[in-house]
């Protein structure tokens, strides 16, 4: 009887510790994400402006990407200013950021930012010969990845969020 009670107490203690660790982990992981996500789709051509106005909290980082078909069925994200494949995008913390995307190909694409959150910011589908965008404002520094929903192995890159 004494051994059974001791085993029961140890089992309850272990389950309590596991539940506590799970709750704490869940709380912190779900709060490490990009905040203030806004999805948009448009058909507007814009120029590249990857330098924000001088320490203005309402300044905007705008990055222009395009899609390139390297070989039949193999696509890449392309930096519109220097033609770099699957570029690293640099944006500033607490600054509105917009990734504008031109799709001159004959297939649809969707840019998704991997944040670790349940809902991921995305450009929605960008139809062939169309354009779209994804807007976000990160409340923390760090490195995130982005990819195409339809071509995740060849259309992927990183986003570096840095302090101003």
Image: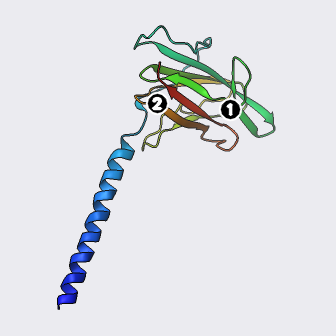
Pointer 1 local density, CA inside 10 Å: few below 14, some 14–19, many at least 20: many
Judging depth in this view, the residue of 20 and 124 nearest the camera is 20
Q: Provide residue 28's location: percent of width, then percent of height.
A: 35, 45
Rendering colour mode: rainbow
Query: Is 117 left, or right, of 69 in this rendering?
Result: left
Q: Disc 2 to disc 1, how far (Cα)? A: 21 Å
Query: Which residue corresponds to mark 1?
Result: 86
Judging depth in this view, the residue of 79 and 70 nearest the camera is 79
Q: Provide residue 164's location: percent of width, then percent of height.
A: 47, 18
Q: Secondary structure at mark 2?
A: loop
Judging depth in this view, the residue of 131 and 7 nearest the camera is 7
Q: Secondary structure at mark 1?
A: loop
Query: Is 41 left, or right, of 21 in this rendering?
Result: right
The residue at the far bottom in this view is: 1
- Which residue lies at the image location 25% right of the left edge and 76% below the top edge? 10
Q: Provide residue 146's location: percent of width, then percent of height.
A: 58, 36
């Amino acid at each position: 009887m004494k051994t059974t009670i001791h085993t029961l107490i140890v089992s309850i203690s272990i389950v309590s510790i596991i539940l506590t660790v799970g709750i704490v982990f869940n709380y912190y992981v779900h709060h490490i994400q990009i905040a203030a996500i806004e999805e948009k789709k448009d058909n507007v051509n814009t120029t590249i402006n990857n330098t924000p106005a001088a320490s203005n909290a309402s300044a905007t980082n705008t990055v222009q990407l395009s899609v390139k078909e390297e070989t039949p069925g193999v696509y890449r994200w392309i930096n519109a200013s220097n033609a770099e494949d699957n570029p690293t995008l640099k944006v500033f913390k607490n600054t509105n950021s917009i990734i504008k995307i031109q799709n001159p190909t004959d297939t649809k694409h969707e840019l998704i930012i991997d944040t670790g959150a349940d809902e991921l910011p995305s450009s929605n589908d960008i139809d062939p010969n169309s354009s779209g965008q994804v807007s976000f404002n990160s409340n923390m520094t760090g490195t995130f990845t982005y990819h195409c929903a339809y071509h995740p192995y060849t259309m992927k890159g990183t986003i570096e969020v840095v302090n101003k």
